[in-house]
Image: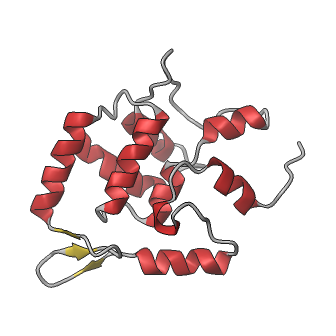
Amino acid sequence: MNISGNIMDITSKYTKVHPHSKGLLPHSPGDFKNILKNATSKVDDNNVSTVPSGIVASNQNKEELFDKIAQEYNLHCATFEEFCEVAKILYDNGILTIEEVSVATFDWDRVSKEYNLPSQYCINTDSKGRRDWIAEYEAKCQNPLRNSSVNRGILQVLQQFN
């Protein structure tokens, strides 16, 4: 297998959403660490988290946000594009970290097709390209090779839609 270019070239080509950097991925591991450091949520004494964009999301607003998302999207039967839209909304509201949204929106199907690799997804799509994203991350967290803190973080957020 011959994959030309570095990992950042591949990542930028296949990541659907990278909201913090407005589409531009970091060019070195140091840049990525700085983005992660700057994107980390802070929790104040009133249990309110503030995110870099200045949005303030209280626990009550988070519940409302999850309800609104659940009314518009069914994460048990969503396309990759729909899942990316949800991930961006969750990131914009300080619920997913930059690392989690980057992992969640990486298009493994596109990479698999272009480089003739086996699929990295655990759950197959239906004939219309829809996948159960909650089951996908549950399956990833059951697999010792894919059970990362990032995947567990994504799953923890997705389980709030059950």
What colour-coding does the image apply?
A: secondary structure
Q: Position of residue 30 (x, y in %)?
A: 64, 81
In this image, 27 relative to 56: left or right?
right
**Looking at the image, which residue is at 39% across and 45% down?**
85
**Looking at the image, which residue is at 56% across and 60% down?**
23
Q: From the viewer's perspective, is residue 20 above or below residue 102?
A: below
Residue 149 showing in the rendered view: no
In the rendered image, the quadrant that contains the N terminus is top right
**Looking at the image, which residue is at 50% across and 53% down?**
17
Residue reaching furthest top? 127
Q: From the viewer's perspective, is residue 36 above or below residue 95?
A: below
Q: Position of residue 87 (x, y in %)?
A: 39, 50
Using the rendered view, name the quadrant where residue 6 is placed: bottom right
Using the rendered view, name the quadrant where residue 119 is placed: top right
In this image, 55 relative to 116: left or right?
left
In this image, 63 relative to 156: left or right?
left
Q: Position of residue 161 (x, y in %)?
A: 24, 41
Q: Position of residue 9 (x, y in %)?
A: 74, 58
Residue reaching furthest front? 22
**Looking at the image, which residue is at 65% across and 56% down?**
12
Residue 69 showing in the rendered view: yes
In the rendered image, the quadrant that contains the C terminus is top left
In this image, 121 relative to 69: left or right?
right
Residue reaching furthest bottom? 45
Count of numbered badges drawn on the protein: 0
